[in-house]
Amino acid sequence: MKKSIVLIGKESVGKSQLIRSLTGKGAYSEKLKGTTINVQSYETDQYRFIDTPGILLETDSLTSKLALNEIPDKDCVILVISATSIDQDLSDLLPLVQDKPGVIIITHWDRMETVIKKEVLQKIEQELEVPIIKLDARHISSIEKDEVFETLTNPQTFKKAKVATLVKVTLKLHKSLFEIPVLGKFLSLLLLFLPALIAVNFANFIADNFYDPVFNSLSPILNIINTFPAPINHLLGKDYGIVAMFPFLVLYALPTVFLFAVIWSLYKTSGLIDRLTVTIHQWITHFGLAGRDVVRIIMGFGCNVPAVISTRSCSTCTRGNSISAIAFGAACSYQLPATIAIFAAVNMGYLVIPYLIILVTTTLLYLWITTSKETKLLSSKLVINHLDYLQWPSLRSIIAEIMVLVKEFFTVAFPIFLIICVIAGTLNWLGAIAALSSLLSPVMALFNLPAEAVASVVLGSIRKDGIAIGLLTPGWQGVKVPLTSPVQVLTVVYLAGVLLPCIVTLTTIIREISIKFALKLVLKQMITAVIFSLLIAWIGFILF
């Protein structure tokens, strides 16, 4: 049986990079036995390395403690600390690993090698009676790798929860624009949203130039498929079949996810993401989030599925809010292009900015209303009390980060995409979508919308590109929706976009958390979306 090596450390200390450098293997996700904690596992011939979520808030320490309690005594712990904050990391983390066999690995050693006295580290090593290995996780030599594996064969027990000897050296960082009050926070938010904006615009550029050729090349196939007997024609062609939806996948979702992954990996491997999220943290805690959670939410603008999966590394107390924000306000690579297409079709392209402002504002209000005071308090307690340094990103690290996001898209999002196409095609064949639209048509009057707008709401709840199909495809109901004012356009795209998370996102949430959590989320989101949509519709009607 393989020996398990569990890595414990603060967020951004380099645990994942360390394991990749040691093993050269890719990760697979699993729940740690006896807990609800998702971890990344890497297997070699002798060992199974388990990368636990990084510690960012006080509650994460409790989570890690529960995880460690499930580890058999024969297994080993690697306590990963940063050379830039040795004293603080040891103070925070030693109590978690007390009485466990293990080793200490100090990362980022290349940054502090010339300023930290090795004699002091030797004294700490003697005091703790646990081996200490110093290295740069991005560039581990064969000698260092051998030293790590040799140490793991005979780990020593962490007998002390604190150490008397102090290094008394920290990395002094030059202040940047991000530390300027107010300006730094606005700049951080801008840079955080920039990857999503670039990725979506890139996808729109690809679609504008290649949609017609791709669609025209598929038209002969679709024409043949649509002659097949039901339900085959509905499952493969018609409005929501697999082949009919293929252009949306290739031209919108895939380019968005890929470019987003490239930019995001640059942010992450350079240390910029840590600087940005620490800067905005105090603003975000009022909504039950930590600064780092904004990263996962903005990932949803590429694809909601990898974004929801990435919340595995969120703090225990903020993961639910992060998922809620993704489901409510992260307009994915289907939703945002579909919304922009609607604005363009009705010659109201100027509505993009007001729409995004409304979406962000109502998402924050939604979190603020539905988050308990206890969660807001817990999310404000950062364990990390220093800013990480910026560095040139490693090409190997960039490729690894890109591969993780793209792999999750193809292994999780794509299969669900196919399943939902089958479900939607079946519902369309059975007439369920048309019947539901007919049933809900009178409700549209409450939002000052024409009855025909219901198609967009119903289809948008299945897949977010359905917002455009319901509004801009005359053939779907034989009528083009008569929207007469900017307020009506904003109301319908908002209601269709946020009333429900799409089935792909909802399915992922059920798999990641539970069906109970998903049902509660849906209920809260529906109620809040209806209230906000009514306010947009009638305040807009009165004012304009």
Image: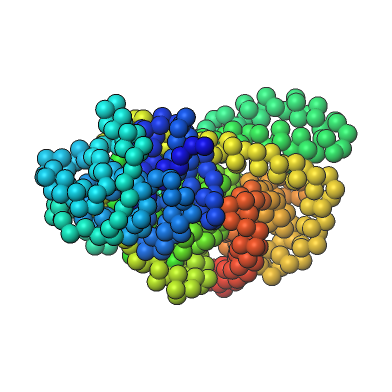
Given residues 391 and 336, the one toward you in this image is 391
Residue 291 occupies quadrant: bottom left
Q: How many marks?
A: 0
Q: Is residue 14 above or below residue 165?
A: above
Residue 392 occupies quadrant: top left
Q: Residue furthest bottom?
A: 373
Asked if residue 516 lies left or right of residue 309, the reply is: right
Asked if residue 232 lies left or right of residue 489, the reply is: right
**Percent coordinates x, y for residue 145 in the rendering:** 31, 31
Q: Can I make out residue 51 in this image?
A: no
Q: Residue at x 61, y 62 (%)?
A: 517
Q: Can I make out residue 35 in this image?
A: yes
The quarter of the picture where the C terminus appears is bottom right
Residue 92 occupies quadrant: bottom left
**Percent coordinates x, y for residue 471 in the rendering:** 68, 50
**Percent coordinates x, y for residue 459 in the rendering:** 70, 51
Q: Residue at x 52, y 61 (%)?
A: 320
Asked if residue 225 lies left or right of residue 418, the reply is: right
**Percent coordinates x, y for residue 470 in the rendering:** 70, 50
Given residues 164 and 461, the one toward you in this image is 164
Q: Residue at x 55, y 55 (%)?
A: 34
Q: Is residue 180 above or below residue 472?
A: below
